[in-house]
Amino acid sequence: MEAAVILAKCPKKKKLYGIRVQKMSDGDWWRTWAFPVDEKRAHKEGYDTTKVQGSLYYTKEYKGCPYCEAKSFVQCSGCFKIFCWNGEEQMTCPWCNGKLGSIVTTTEKFHVSGGDI
C-alpha cells in the first residue's frame, strides 16, 4: 500500500494541516484522515516535499479539515497549494494571499507538490 501526507491550509483559521492520502489499486488517491501539524514537524517529516498526482477523493470516514471540517478544497492558481473550500464563490489563498476570483468549477484531479511551507 502506498500512502503519503499532503499539506493544506484552513483559510478560516490560517492554520496548516496534513491530509493522509492512500493510493488504491485503481491508481486513484483517497483522503483517509486529516490532522493539525505545525511547520517544523511538517518539514521534519518531509510533508513539504510530497508529490501526488491524480484524483484525490475522500473516504466516508474522512472527517475533513481539523479546523473547519471542510471536505472539499481548491488549488491556488498562483502558488498551486491547496486549502479548504466550503462553497465560496471568491476566496483569498491562505498561502500566498492571492485572490482567486470566481470559482466556477471544481475537480477531484490534482497535481499537488509540497514546496515551501
Image (cartoon, helix red, strand yellow):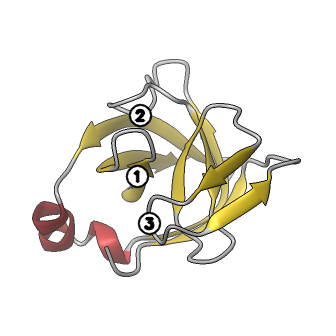
Disc 3, disc 2: CB below 8 Å? no
Q: Quadrant of residue 57?
A: top right
Figure check: 96 above or below 68:
below
The picture places residue 60, in percent across and down from the top left corner, at 55, 18
In the image, 77 versus 110, the foreground residue is 77
Q: Whole-Å distance between the Cαs marked 2 and 1?
A: 9 Å
Q: Looking at the image, which is closer to me, 54 or 18?
A: 18
Residue receiving disc 3:
95
Q: Which residue is mark 2?
A: 65
- What is the x, y in percent for residue 95? 44, 66
**What's the residue at 52%, 67% (across, down)?**
81
Asked if one can make out residue 1 in the rendered structure from this viewpoint, the answer is no
State left or right for residue 37 relative to residue 71. Answer: left
Dot 1 corresponds to which residue? 9
In this picture, residue 49 sits left or right of residue 97? left
Kindly state the secondary structure of the residue where label 3 is placed. loop
Residue 17 seen: yes
Between residues 94 and 7, which one lies in front from this camera angle?
Answer: 94
Q: Secondary structure at mark 2?
A: loop
Left or right: 61, with 54 as reference point: left
x, y percent for residue 88: 70, 36
Q: Earlier in the sequence, mark 2 or mark 1?
A: 1
Q: Are marks 3 and 1 in contact (CB under 8 Å)?
A: yes
